[in-house]
Amino acid sequence: MAQDRTPVSIITGFLGAGKSTLLNQLLKDPAMQDAAIIINEFGDVSIDHLLVERSGDGIIELAEGCLCCTVRGELVDTLAELMDGIQTGKLKTVNRVVIETTGLADPAPVMQSIIGNPVIAQNFSLNGMVTVVDAVNGMSTLDHHKEAVKQVAVADRLVLTKQTLGSQAQIAALKERLATINPRATIEDGDRDGWQAVALLENGLYDAANKIGDVSRWLGEEADHDHHDHGHHHDDHGHHHDVNRHNAAIRSFSIVHEQPIDPMAIEMFVDLLRSAHGDKLLRMKAIVQLSDNPERPLVLHGVQSIFHPPQRLAAWPDPSDRRTRMVLITDGLPEAFVRDLFGAFTGALRIDKPDRQAVMDNPLAVPGIRF
């Protein structure tokens, strides 16, 4: 029966671990040409789907919430619509579905949506859990976020990224901890190129019995939750997160800016944010229209105080929308402070343009910037 079902692979991992980078690597493999990609973004402005290096055909976006809570029902609906479209000939046949979760996702509800829904399970099979782990921030993330521990525990394969940025001792300690949480998972080198999609994603029918005992318990709890909460999966819509699943201090917010931005202004804004408040910055992604070349947007990726080198795209993914869009996920960092800081550097806040060193020394002294 499993041979007649479409395999579903889930790529998970905490914020900034490198899920989108891995997905882009996999999409270079011709074997992924007929795959459907479902991307979940945590926030009211979407950026991730713009940065997937493939045409929009086959890219399905689930935004404004986390797959494990507010948009979980939408995943079931999306898979059902995909199945119906294929069966009625409205959509081309897909050979695989790949789901990239938001970094805050508890994987158990996502998995249960596939294996526990009778209609979905009749047509799709959970065929592999791939968890991406950041070698630099991984140990701290496991210490402070239960979602990260669960993401590691359910994995068939662990992809360890950013190893060149960590020490040998740091990486060895992290690998030892990963093996303790999930002794059955293989650990792959996430810094290499040339991924073969099938080799990574094809892991056979998912078997929770091969994991630590907690995995079966988590799935059982989600099945009980579904039974008691049947028909109410849309009740949480309109919220950025479910406080029963995520730290109440974690917030996602977006900044949208209509005008081109001076390159120095965005550099100073990011500089101050990461140096003074990097510990509270769980994730930042942005696509920015710069004044020196508005036709080529700048892409920014940051996790805490570590930012990837900025990259210029050859052109806007969507030429009809050239606004600067920035999505931040923070832990205890007030939204008003970040917005006012951005406004001070870009002119959106109507104050005299602050001196860079003065702001670095004491941001609270700048009018309009407050905690």
Image (cartoon, rainbow, N blue to C red):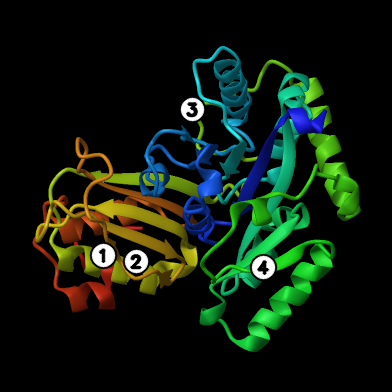
Left or right placement of residue 341 versus residue 28 in this view = left
Res 223 seen here: yes
Location of mark 1 (residue): 269
Q: Residues within 10 Å of mark 1 (few under 14, many from 20)?
A: many
Which of the marked residues, 1 or 4, is nearer the chain's N terminus? 4
Q: Are marks 2 and 1 in contact (CB under 8 Å)?
A: yes
Mark 2 residue type? Leu
Q: Do the residues labelled 4 and 3 touch (CB within 8 Å)?
A: no
Which of the marked residues, 3 or 2, is nearer the chain's N terminus? 3
Which of the marked residues, 4 or 3, is nearer the chain's N terminus? 4
Left or right placement of residue 366 versus residue 143 in this view = left
Q: Residues within 10 Å of mark 4 (few under 14, many from 20)?
A: some
Please tell me whether residue 37 is drawn above or below residue 284 in the rendered image.
above
Mark 3 residue type? Gly
Which of the labelled discs sits on residue 273, or is there none? 2
Of residues 89 and 339, the one nearer the viewer is 89
Please tell me whether residue 319 is drawn above or below residue 162 in the rendered image.
above
Location of mark 4 (residue): 188
Q: Which residue lies furthest to the front in this view?
A: 30
Which of the marked residues, 3 or 1, is nearer the chain's N terminus? 3
Mark 1 residue type? Phe
Location of mark 3 (residue): 238
Please tell me whether residue 179 is drawn above or below residue 128 in the rendered image.
below
State how far apart marks 4 and 2 are (Cα): 32 Å
Of residues 338 and 92, the one nearer the viewer is 92
SS class, disc 1: helix
State how far apart marks 2 and 1 are (Cα): 6 Å
Mark 4 residue type? Glu
State how far apart marks 4 and 3 are (Cα): 38 Å
SS class, disc 2: helix
